[in-house]
Image: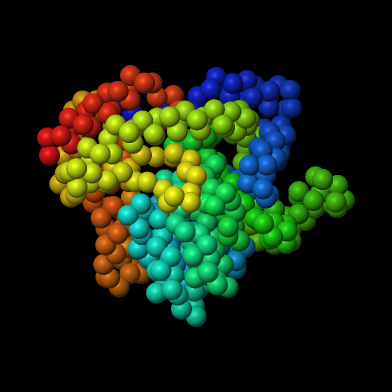
Amino acid sequence: MIPFNKPVWLGTEILRITEAITTHGHVAGGGPFARACEESLARMLGQPALLVTSCTHALEMAALLLDVKEGDEFIVPSYTFVSSANAFVLRGARPVFADVDPNGNLDPREVTRLRTPRTRAVVAVHYAGSSCDMTDLLDRCGRIPLVEDAAQALGATFDGKPLGTFGVAGAISFHETKNVGCGEGGALTVADPALLERAEYLRDKGTNRRRFLTGLVDKYTWVDVGSSYALSDLNAAYLSAQLDAFERIQARRATLHDRYVRELERAVERKGGYLVRPDPRNRPNHHLLGLVLRAREQRDRFIAHMKAHGITTPFHYVALHLSPMGKRFHGGEALPGAERLTDCLVRLPLFFNMTDAEQDEVIARTLEFVDAL
């Protein structure tokens, strides 16, 4: 079998975990490996990042930082993972589902169309490690805070600026399916020092424990709402090895991604489909290779064809406005971009440890199917 994904494995991760246990003797949150990861992320992003237990929790923290409450609305692309909406729904806010462009990113014009006096936030999801026109999006947001779901986007930029650093907060994922990971983990990026200080309270169960650990106060106490969002130093140790090798990991993914494009793009386009490609102003991080076919029937037959040859090629999201929960909030309006991707998008295997022989097989079987359409 050729899986859709294998978690990155360098071989050095186990050494870091051993070091956390035997040398540092610190395996809970806030340990030396967590600090090392946060320093690496700050260098990559140009602003602070707090290591947390998941991208989902980072989004929940963003909703808390914005004091989202019942009666508020937030604009979110329908074609996304449930966490993009759930984090704000948990605070009592109502999602307003927006359509996406052919590459899966929020169409900025939707913000102008959907915003109301109740709009408390706009959530941009950087699909496949690229983004919409962020300059246009920020202009259309105006004073409405922008939150970036950059789960898939670490290492990607728009006009040279890292994705995850355009809004008031950004959420990054270190799930095992991401370019680098630690099984489960995430990070919250925050530019405003006041919000950063509060984010530290939220992460540490609403206490000022971090200020105590750094000697800024002589005891710590309960100062805000919060929860247990700090990532274990065992996970951080694993992650630190991969962050140290980030450029090597990215280079391999780029090689695999670009070969898929060279070998498949023209054949797919001749049959009326296309490959998901970034905006020219993006430097993508090659998180995934999405192939969009003409119809759902073709997509389903492609998945079955690849499975018959031992290759896993899953589709991605069911648009949230079509889901049982989403229908509670949505008025039934069609969102054709999100619906096209729900029906027609499929993802090809793409992971750091993928061999050239495995990619040869995926390409050959894909061309076999496409040429027969």
Q: Is residue 239 left or right of residue 302?
A: right
Residue lying at the far left of the rendered structure: 372
Drawn side of residue 184 relative to residue 47, left or right: left
In front: 210, or 333?
333
The residue located at (80%, 45%) in the rendering is: 213
Q: What is the x, y in percent for residue 66?
A: 60, 66
- Percent coordinates x, y for residue 228 in the rendering: 62, 49
Q: How many marks?
A: 0
**Vertical side of 227 occupied by 67: above or below:** below
- In the image, is residue 273 above or below residue 364? below
Residue 86 visible at all: no
Q: Residue at x 23, y 44 (%)?
A: 269
Looking at the rendering, in which quadrant would you find the C terminus? top left
Left or right of 213? Residue 341 is: left
Front-lying residue, 46 or 281:
281
Q: Residue at x 38, y 65 (%)?
A: 98
Q: Is residue 141 above or below residue 204?
A: below
Q: Foreground: 314 or 291? A: 291
Task: Give the percent coordinates (x, y) of residue 54.
Answer: 53, 45
